């Protein structure tokens, strides 16, 4: 684990998914010491921060893959839909990439993906209306 990729990963993950490293550490750290840091370093510091593909496009690919893998990925799909929104994806783009996966993962996987997206979009709406009060 490189200090520089871990630092880059922490900055990016905190921007896109605030508190994720701490949540992973709290849940899994007693079983797998260092697992949270490894996820942040590899996923965010070495993958999402790479040059060559814009961050929003990496999120489109991630959302598509998680959708095609099926309903068992719903928690990760929600996290990545929320991150994709912060990276600039529109609700329409997310819905379209999820629906495109009906060709590859099947209708149930796409419908499960759309349901996950609706949950994230509703959370966004609730957050924006509660902060506007």
Image: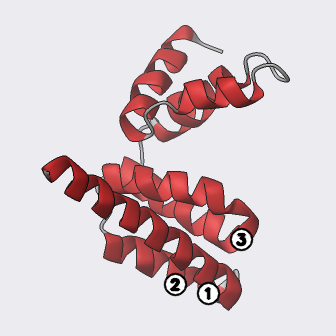
Q: Residue at x 71, y 71 (%)?
A: 71
Q: Is residue 96 visible?
A: yes
Residue at mark 1: 102
Q: Residue at x 42, y 49 (%)?
A: 83
If you read the primary sequence from the N terminus, does the residue marked by circle 3 or circle 1 appear first? 3
Question: Is 57 displayed left or right of 113 in the figure?
Answer: left
Q: Position of residue 101 (x, y in %)?
A: 59, 80
Residue at mark 3: 71
Q: Residues within 10 Å of mark 3 (few under 14, many from 20)?
A: some
If the image is split into quadrants, where does the N terminus sit? top right
Q: Residue at x 47, y 53 (%)?
A: 58
Q: Residues within 10 Å of mark 2 (few under 14, many from 20)?
A: many
**Furthest residue toward front:** 133
Does the residue at mark 1 contact the one at mark 2 (Cβ under 8 Å)? yes
* Residues at marks 1 and 2, CA–CA distance in whole angstroms: 5 Å
Report the mark closest to the observer, 3 or 1.
Answer: 3
Quadrant in the picture for residue 125: bottom left
Q: Secondary structure at mark 1?
A: helix
Does the residue at mark 2 contact the one at mark 3 (Cβ under 8 Å)? no
19 and 51: which is toward the camera:
19
* Residues at marks 2 and 3, CA–CA distance in whole angstroms: 14 Å
Q: Residues within 10 Å of mark 1 (few under 14, many from 20)?
A: some
Q: Is residue 40 visible?
A: no
Color style of the picture: secondary structure
Residue at mark 2: 99
Question: Is 86 displayed left or right of 118 in the figure?
Answer: left
The mark found on residue 110 in the picture is none
**Furthest residue toward left:** 132
Q: Residue at x 52, y 19 (%)?
A: 5
Up/down of 2 relative to 94, above or below: above
Q: Secondary structure at mark 2?
A: helix
Q: Secondary structure at mark 3?
A: helix
């Amino acid at each position: 684990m490189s200090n520089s990729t871990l630092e880059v990963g922490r900055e990016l993950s905190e921007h896109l998914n605030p508190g994720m490293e701490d949540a992973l550490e709290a849940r899994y750290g007693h079983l797998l010491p260092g697992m949270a840091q490894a996820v942040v370093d590899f996923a965010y510091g070495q993958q999402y921060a790479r040059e060559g593909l814009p961050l929003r496009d990496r999120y489109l690919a991630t959302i598509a893959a998680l959708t095609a893998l099926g309903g068992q990925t719903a928690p990760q799909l929600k996290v990545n839909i929320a991150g994709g929104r912060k990276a600039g994806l529109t609700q329409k783009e997310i819905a379209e990439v999820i629906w495109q996966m009906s060709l590859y993962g099947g209708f149930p996987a796409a419908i499960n993906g759309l349901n996950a997206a609706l949950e994230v979009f509703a959370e966004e709406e609730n957050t924006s209306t509660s902060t506007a009060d």
